[in-house]
Image (cartoon, grey):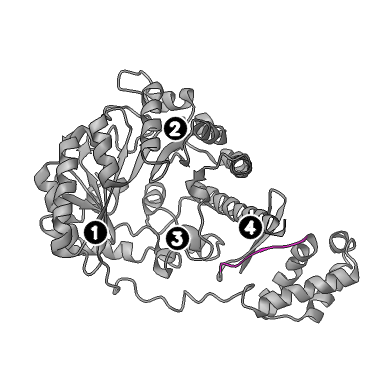
Amino acid sequence: MIHKYKNNGYNIVLDVCSGSVHVVDDCVYDLLDVTDDLYSKFGRFSVMDVLGAVSLACQTEEGSAKYSGYGQAEIAESAEEITEIVSSGQLYSEDEYKDLLVDYRKRQTVVKALCLHVSHDCNLSCRYCFAQEGEYHGDRALMSLEVARASLDYLVRSSGSRRNLEVDFFGGEPLMNWNVVVETVRYGRSLEKEHDKKFRFTLTTNGTLMKDEYLDFINAEMDNVVLSIDGRKEVNDRMRPHRGGQGSYDEIVPIFKKIAESRNQDRYYVRGTYTRNNLDFATDVRHLADLGFKQISVEPVVAAPEDDYSIRDEDLEGLCEEYDKLAQTYLEYRKAGKPFNFFHFMLDLEGGPCVYKRLSGCGSGTEYLAVTPWGDLYPCHQFVGNEDFCLGNVHDGVKRTDVVNEFKVCNVYARESCRDCFARFYCSGGCAANAYNFHGNILDVYEAGCVLQRKRIECAIMIKAALAEDEEGEMEQ
């Protein structure tokens, strides 16, 4: 299976199963329509097959318009180039992964990451918050140190031989329970040598409660920090106000700048959400970059159709064009000496995640779990509050193995919509929570998210091609 597309002046061909990316000229690009048809019918083809198919195609008005502008020598050369790439295994390669799959219910998994909800409370009142101002369909509560320690104990004993473990302090707003955050980190460090483990701690915060002494501890202990801001002042303050209605932008921008600089513009993200109120979200990314932030993530809101800020089907075409604009901005800023990273454009074409990660995604419900202030375990933070997905608790462990088994089979081959999608090995089937919330089935897909993810992947590959071209040009000079 191949996927070909044009983006920002590049003709790009992705061989889906091998992951090979080819930047081709117009003639090769157009001939791939012929070879695609030959391959789907016969499973193989020669140069003569291609030339014969082009000759037949030219007998039609459409084919004549497409190929008459190319000379016979150019077409023959392009056909030979295509067949050489095919013979090298970098075009129309077979899907080796599907034959390697085992029954995922029998596959042993270990827990390697926890999302600790240290605070089911928040001092902001973000309109799109899936956690209902931190309450998660329940009562406001702060996690006790006892539950936090029990959570780390559970992670250690459930992680098998895996050494590197991850813990994200989440909410609500985790800084509302700062002392527990500090003591939990200290407890984790005390476990490392005894159990031969290494904890990687992260923190997600709106920043409004940040203090200098908090920042010192964060910089010493947190591998990553996620800082919530939506972009321009009017955009951020419309969706992320305090409970009294006042905006948070003027309050958090200087704090976030200080955090970013104190971490040498690394190991953090400013993370925003765009809605129907700012479909021109590339402007918000530029705004954040112009403020000096180098690590940026802005993602589409996932909301019920009746919410006035939700993304609608009629918005998708414009949003895809907005990602194309953002890709141009990304390259322009690099050339101008003002580079920044955009999370969804960061794609590893050579290494990337292991096979099972490519197929099954984030590991929610199996390798990654969320913990409530009371110690209850859920597949991830987005399922918290839905009692049908309560797996157990940190004291007694997972009891709902039936639910875990459902998540074990969450992979791209179990999702009908993913099987013929070019992006399946990059998005791993998408978010199970979004699929469930829109269709009541974790093996379904969230269609709008799929459209936007495919576009982001196309842009990310184009950026790789553009950067490789620039590097090649520099080497020739």
Q: Is residue 29 left or right of residue 155?
A: right
Q: Element under label 2?
A: loop
Q: Amino acid at mark 3?
A: Ser
Query: What residue lies at 67% left-to-right and 59% top-to-bottom?
Result: 475
Quarter the C terminus occupies: bottom right
Check residue 428 in the rendering and tell me which mark sits there, or answer none. Answer: 3
Task: Determine the CA span between mark 3 and mark 1.
Answer: 27 Å
Badge 3 or badge 1: first in the primary sequence? 1
Q: Quarter of the image holding residue 245?
A: top left
Q: Are marks 2 and 1 in contact (CB under 8 Å)?
A: no
Task: Determine the CA span between mark 4 and mark 3.
Answer: 26 Å
Q: Amino acid at mark 2?
A: Asp
Residue 62 visible in rendering? yes
Q: Are marks 2 and 3 in contact (CB under 8 Å)?
A: no
The correct choice, above or below, for 2 with respect to 309 in the image is: below
Residue under pointer 4? 468
Q: Position of residue 316 (x, y in %)?
A: 57, 42
Query: What residue lies at 79% left-to-right and 70% top-to-bottom?
Result: 78
Crowd around label 4: few <14 · some 14–19 · many ≥20 (10 Å): few
Q: Amino acid at mark 1?
A: Lys
Q: Is residue 20 magenta?
A: yes
Quarter the N terminus occupies: bottom right
Badge 2 or badge 4: first in the primary sequence? 2
Q: Amino acid at mark 4?
A: Ala
Check residue 198 in the rendering and tell me which mark sits there, or answer none. Answer: 1
Residue under pointer 2? 230
Check residue 280 in the rendering and tell me which mark sits there, or answer none. Answer: none
Task: Determine the CA span between mark 2 and mark 3.
Answer: 26 Å
Query: What residue lies at 56% left-to-right and 71% top-to-bottom?
Result: 18
Q: Element under label 1?
A: strand
